[in-house]
Each structure stands twice: as C-alpha cells, then as structure tokens.
Image (spheres, helix red, strand yellow):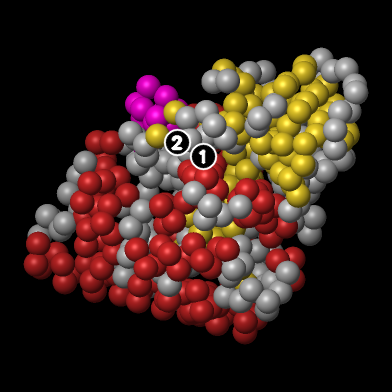
Amino acid sequence: MDSILIVNATIVNEGEVFEGDVYIRGGRIEKIHKGQVGQNADKIIDAKGSFLLPGVIDDQVHFREPGLIHKGDIYSESMAAVAGGVTSYMEMPNTVPNTVTQELLAEKYEIGKRKSLANYSFYFGATNDNLEEVLRTDRENVCGIKVFMGSSTGNMLVDNVKTLEGIFSNVDMLIATHCEDESTIRRNSELYRRKYGEEVPMELHPDIRSREACFLSSSMAVELAKKYGTKLHILHISTANELELFDNLLPLDQKRITSEACIHHLWFSREDYKIKGSLIKWNPAVKEESDREAIFQALLENRIDVLATDHAPHTIEEKQNTYFKAPSGGPLVQHSLVAAFEFVKTGRMTIERLVEKMCHNPAILFQVTSRGFIREGYHADIVILDPNHSWRVETSNILYKCGWSPFEGHLFSSSVTHTIVSGHLVYEFGKFDESKTGERLRFDR
C-alpha cells in the first residue's frame, strides 16, 4: 500500500497532546491535521482512544548476529522490536566476529538490509589496536563508535589510558561507552569467589560489579571527553553516584557529554534478585532502590537524556548456570514501551516526557535524519498504543528467539496495536507484514 490514513488519534509529539489525523504516502508523513484530514487512502486506521507516537529509537541493543544466533538474530529480535513499538535500533559490535573492521561492518549492514523488520544502524567497535580502522568510519552512515571500558573480553576491553586518549583525541563522531572499571570488578570477583566458590548468590552481583567500579570508569570517560572536546554518550547509568557527572543546563543538541538510562535500572532493584535471580543479571548491575529512584529523578531532570534497553538475549539454559557462568544481559525490546508507559499510568512520568526520552532525544542526540518526530516530510515511523488494553506476558506471546522475559507473568496495562516502519505497516494486532524490510539510518553530521 502506498498511502495510510490514521484517524481520530491522540497524537503525542514535541510536548503537545492533541486529537488529529495523520496521512502517510510514499513512506513519508505528508499531512498532520488537528482534526480530520478529509482524505482517502489505501489503508485507513481508526485510532480512537489510542495514542499515536513517533516510533521508539533504541540506541543500545545486542541482536547477536553474526556468530551468536542461538541467542537471537537480526530477524527475530527486530520482529520483537516492532511488536513493541521500536521502529529503529542501534546495535552493538560485540558479535562473533567483533565488528572491528570496515569490511565486517559492511557485512553486518548487508544482513540488516536483508533481514531487519525495523530501521537499523550498527556501531563500529574500538579495540586496543584498531584506531586506523575506527577513523575510517563514515560519520553520516554509522551511529557511533562503541568503547567497552569494562565488561568485555579479549581485544574489545579498552581500559588502557593511552589507548583511550588516542581514541578520544582523534574520533570526531559520537563515542558511546560501557563504563565499569575492570580491575575493581576482578578484585571483587576474587574476593567473593574465595568466600563462595562458584555458588555466589545472585543478589551479590551489585557488590561485585559495584558502584565504585561504575563511577571510576564513568568519571574517567567524562574527564577524557572534557580534555579533548569529545562527543561522549555514557550508556546504562546504574548508580546515583554517577549522576553528578552530568548537567541539565544545556539543550540536548548543545551537550557534548550525555547519558542513557535503561528500563531494567528503572524497574528492578536488589530485592528482586531473590525472585528473578540471573534473569535480572545485567552489566552494569541492577543496584539499590535508592539508585533506581535517583536515576528516575535524573531522567525527569534531564541529567539523563535517553531511555533505552540494552537488549541482550541469552538462552534460558545459559542463564540457569551458577553465578560466574551465567551470562549478563536480558531481552527487553518487545516490552520497553509498555513498561515505560506504566510510569505514565501511575503518574510518575508524563506521556510527553516518555516520547521525549524514547523517541525525540535519541534522534536529536545521534542527529538521525528525518526520524524521531511526527513531522510533515519525515519518514513515517509511527506507533499506535492502546492505553487501556491490558495483557499478561506469557511464554506463548514472547517473540524473542531466547523465549523468555524478565517480565514474564507481569500484567501490562497498555499494548502496541500498530507499528509503521518507514511508511510500511509491519505490525497490526499481532500480525506481521514482512513484505518490506526496514531502512538504514542516516545521520545529519
């Protein structure tokens, strides 16, 4: 279909909430009207009683392809993403092989072109010795450079100060970092291994991957960014301590140092390990309730700029191992929007702020071309959310290839009914139209 007309929607965009219609043609938003557009279309969707939002842009996912496709792949995880209202994603380089050469990056884009139901971009990975390759990255066609300053293995762990200075001083595009001090984590690991052997209780994960480890690494990254004027984006903030590193004084498009929070750090706390165990084992760790509340407040105060997932699936068999053998990470893209909307339902966040943090701000921060807003002339990336259609997360409705969710058993009060990706109605009431794949993201840099 070439044209879609969405009528009677409650449109949320750029701080406004209003009733209106949206007309889409040729993959773009052609007309937005506060009231009725009064136009025919190949497909008409009546969104009365539902919110019409820009598609969610998730700036941090691990879709596991190539090399780890027993956990997830670009097709399976992008399917889960569009079912959850995520129309665009930025995927990480710690696949097998690591995405650390331009040739491997190009191969990944070819996979995305063939298989992704959502729009896509892939980070280029920095290592201890690939600066020349890093500098070849096309800033207009790649979302950013990823630096693992902790919690990685082999050559993708970059925590040598001289190596980091080389990256921060030479790269002229956004650097996204995972910040945990590896030496602190190793010291803590050995301490608890001596005490418990392999049977470390999962609730001690935040003591091993401690707040000190997070702050040491995050503060180093901020110091380097200030020294060299680098555009730095610190991912998955997990402690109250780190919040002092960020300000809320500048508009987002003028900030050089920004940060992201993830759904799981707003939802879970240390107490939840008793029930969820390794299912909520992430790096950085879910920590104290006080950290959770501080992160939430920082999101509202604009010290934290983006809300995303760090979607990172593992099989349930892998997760059922003992502490040191159970991998960190969990699947979230299918449930991130409805989970965030629970904060709206309880009055902790406005729907306008949700859209700002999950849709507008990733587009502004990464300078995504013509996406992230409901604007005439923009790509039609649109989600319709029914705020009153509740559903329970069960094995039968989980779309992740790994087949489980940390939200299993939870009753969400809202549901995604339609997802439009680049003008294509890919998801409608649980059914997928896979006749068109998503598009590669471009960046105005």
Task: Report the amino acid beneath label 2.
Answer: Phe
Q: Which residues are magenta?
A: 392-405
Q: Is residue 109 visible?
A: no
Number of labelled discs? 2
Q: Quadrant of the N terminus?
A: top right
Residue 172 lies in the magenta stretch:
no
- Using residue 309 as the reference point, say whether residue 325 is left or right of it: left
Circle 2/circle 1 CB separation < 8 Å = yes
Which sits in the foreground, 291 or 228?
291
Question: Mark number for residue 318?
Answer: none
- Using residue 352 as the reference point, say whether residue 234 is left or right of it: left
Pointer 1: what residue?
Answer: 338
Vertical placement of residue 4 versus 141, above or below: above
Pointer 2: what residue?
Answer: 412
- Whole-percent x, y for residue 196 in the image: 9, 62
Q: Earlier in the sequence, mark 2 or mark 1?
A: 1
